[in-house]
Amino acid sequence: MPIVSPDPNAPNGKELRILAGNRLKKLITEQPALDTALALQEKLLGREIDLLERIIESGLPSLSLPPRYLATKLKNGIPIFHGEPIPIPEQILQQGLRAFCDDLADGAASRNAALAISETLDAGQLQSKELLLTCLRRDQHRIKQLAMHHALAPDILWLLAELALTPFAYLLCLKTISSPPDYSKDIHDALNKWDLGFCPICASWPAIVEVTGDHFLRCSFCATSWQLSNYRCLYCNNDGENFITAAPDPEQPGRRLQMCGECGGYVKVLAVEIPSVFPLLAIDDLASMDLDLLAIERKYIRPALPEIKKR
């Protein structure tokens, strides 16, 4: 089960903008009903690429995480970032968070929720740093507590923090597992043996399963991909008859849903020519939103993030 880490030779910011623009233009012609959502997606992707470039320019924090220590965590089913005191580039991410608030406030569906979050942040009632660190720890329960305390929409609060953090999480993942071989061999050996449904780096569920011959789970947060050793539900490990993969449209067999009758979870399975580079996975996720709606209509859900337990 070879791990596929973020590509150190990935396109630069200018190339990413061109790739995103071309992909979005194609989608608008294919799915004109998504024009408003795609326009917002283009703005958000541009913002993430800007953040990516700013973080690269400012440099990433140094983490004192010995490879054997990280390998031991992985062998015990604990993702690399879990429980680690990771410093963040506060000013850059806080500015990004505030800018994403403005972007979502321009959208009709999220305007009121985003404006309320902006006002709460500007008033100092909610601290940007606490919000960002809580999201980086993948603590959805705490985000919900913060949202309830300040009468904010928890889903939008989580989304905003994720948007601001994903470029940082991606680069930190790249730095951690793409280090020189003498540093990272132990880590890669452990990653190759990872056989859990959540991300071995940050503990997120995959956004989609990409099929390029093999099946790779793609992290929704840091863009890492990995594989499971056998065909089963990534959420509860069910491999019985009530775990199925179905193509809702027989004319599009490359667009499928995995659905589990045991835990009620689902994930999208998309055939692709090549894996999506960061942060363009979000385009494939949006373009397949019809599959999400079908799964939800059938009472399937995307479960809350897993509770990591020592093994």
Image (tube, rainbow, N blue to C red):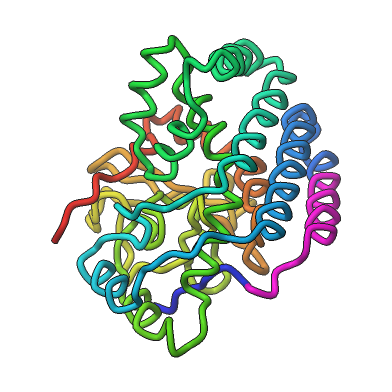
Residue 118 on the magenta segment:
no
Which residue sits furthest bottom?
182
Q: Position of residue 156 (x, y in %)?
A: 53, 24
Closer-to-camera residue (219/140)? 140
Q: Position of residue 85 (x, y in %)?
A: 36, 52
| Residue at 65%, 28% in the rendered image | 98
> Residue 174 falls in which quadrant of the image?
bottom right
Position of 211 with respect to 197 (left or right) is right
Q: What are the residue bounds of the magenta stretch?
A: 8-26
> Residue 261 falls in which quadrant of the image?
top left
As drawn, 305 above or below 81: above
> Residue 300 falls in which quadrant of the image?
top left
Position of 228 with respect to 15 (left or right) is left
| Residue at 72%, 27% in the rendered image | 103
Q: Which quadrant is home to the C terminus?
A: bottom left
| Residue at 67%, 56% in the rendered image | 58
As drawn, 291 above or below 233: above
> How many numbered circles does the render carry?
0
Task: Name the dominant secondary structure of the magenta segment.
Answer: helix
| Residue at 66%, 37% in the rendered image | 96
Q: Which quadrant is home to the N terminus?
A: bottom left
Q: Position of residue 54 (x, y in %)?
A: 71, 52
Position of 205 with respect to 74 (left or right) is right
Which residue sits furthest left?
311
As drawn, 182 above or below 163: below
Q: Position of residue 62 (x, y in %)?
A: 49, 65
Closer-to-camera residue (306/117)? 117
